[in-house]
Image (tube, rainbow, N blue to C red):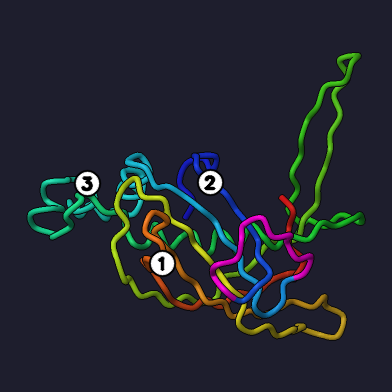
Amino acid sequence: MRLGRRAILPLIRTITTTTTTKTSPTSSPPAVLSVGHALRERRRFTEADVAAYAAVSGDRNPVHLDDAVARELGGFHRGRVVHGMLVASLFPSIIATCFVRALLPPFSPRHFVEQHVSVGTHGVAWFDVWLVQPGAVYASQTLKFAAPVYVGDDVVAEVQALHIRATTANSSAASRYVVKFATKCFVAEEEGSLAIQGEAMAVLPTLELSSE
């Protein structure tokens, strides 16, 4: 689930090419995903994010909305904590947005179309049309919540490819890829503080990494 605009700062997506979680964020991104590659996204969840998620999900547990309750009854010494499932939503967000394959005509109604309108020097409007295949299909996710994420914390979510298998529905269909990912989320202010860990399985339309 994606709440609000993803432009909330700080928000940084970096792509690394090593098998460790300590890779410098300035590493050059790989063109194609392979085993060991890691994708990361940095995010700070705000009070507005938590309130919106509580309203949409119906999870209005006061440990997410009331500092006093969170401290006194929940035992969270810094107050309100972010819903664990909201933090975990970063994993499908990374996977869904990093694997999109641009297509050329002929057009198909099964493809998503994004249209951007621009106005030229003579006031004439034209359309730039981008055709992309449907993105990743999220198949499964396991989660273990190891530590709380407090409202206002910076977190870094990471998905790392563990296994990749090509598959086709029939001989004429384009290949798709079943990928198993290790999923981890760290509290950025506390080096090495693991908040969430688990594994995900996704079906990707391509292994090429989107540059968007």
Residue 122 lies in quadrant: top right
Residue 155 lies in quadrant: bottom left
Query: What secondary structure do most residues of the magenta stretch adopt?
Result: loop
The residue positioned 17% from the left and 46% from the top of the image is 67
Find residue 116 and report its horizontal and vertical position in percent: 76, 35
Asked whether 29 falls inside the magenta stretch, the response is: yes
The residue positioned 85% from the left and 57% from the top of the image is 103
* Residue bearing the label numbered 2: 11
Residue type pointed to by label 2: Leu
Label 1, label 2: how far apart the Cα atoms are: 19 Å
Residue type pointed to by label 3: Leu
Q: Which residues are magenta?
A: 20-32
Q: Earlier in the sequence, mark 1 or mark 2?
A: 2
Secondary structure beneath dot 2 equals: strand
* Residue bearing the label numbered 3: 65
Find residue 164 and report its horizontal and vertical position in percent: 68, 83
Q: Is residue 37 above or below residue 190?
A: below
Find residue 53 and report its horizontal and vertical position in percent: 35, 49
The residue positioned 77% from the left and 55% from the top of the image is 132
Residue type pointed to by label 1: Gly
In this image, 89 relative to 7: left or right? left
The residue positioned 91% from the left and 54% from the top of the image is 105
- Circle 3: is it few (<14), some (14-19), or many (20+) Cα within 10 Å? many
* Residue bearing the label numbered 1: 192
In this image, 86 relative to 7: left or right? left
